[in-house]
Image (cartoon, grey):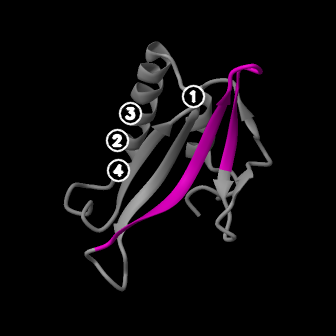
Amino acid sequence: MAFNDLELKRCEKAVGKYVESRRPPPHIRPQLDLSYRIQGQGVEIFEVRPAFNDPSVTIENCVAKATYVKRAQVWRVYWRRADLKWHRYGPRPNARSIEEFLKIVEEDEFRCFYG
């Protein structure tokens, strides 16, 4: 089940503000940028860059993901390991709000999100 309009706008505002604060300077963005997508009950933050062997191809490197569990009213926090699978973020597997999720990603206590 997707977010309702109010939840979606709140999510877009919070994540958009966070991503904008982390984006590199405009002259670097063709080589490295940061973006996000909201699908269903999830939010994903990812880097965007040209492929090293074919600059005409754009690739996305996942940074962080959160999925909202409406029944429990909690965001489940994930990071992507080298096996290219999403894993729960052990130190803080849940967040009570989208803002708390973004704070967890920003603090990146164990260097799981940005390396």
| Quadrant position of residue 60 | bottom left
Q: Which residue is mark 3?
A: 17
On the image, the x and y values in percent for residue 32 come to 34, 64
Left or right: 54 as drawn, with respect to 111: left
Spatial CA distance of label 1 from label 4 is: 19 Å
Residue bearing the label numbered 2: 20
Q: Secondary structure at mark 3?
A: helix
Counting residues from the N terminus, which is met first, the one under dot 3 or under dot 4?
3
- Count residues near mark 3 (Cα–Cα under 10 Å), then give few for <14, some for 14-19, many for 20+: few
For the point 62% across and 30% down, the residue is 100
Q: Quadrant of the C terminus?
A: bottom right
Q: Earlier in the sequence, mark 2 or mark 1?
A: 2
Q: Residue furthest left?
A: 27
Which stretch appears magenta?
57-78
The CA distance from mark 2 to mark 1 is 16 Å
Q: Residue at x 57, y 37 (%)?
A: 42
Question: Disc 1 marks which residue?
Answer: 98
- Position of residue 39 relative to residue 64, above or below, is above
77 and 108: which is toward the camera: 77
Tell me where residue 21 appears, x and y as whole percent.
37, 41
Mark 3–mark 2 distance (CA, rounded to whole Å): 5 Å
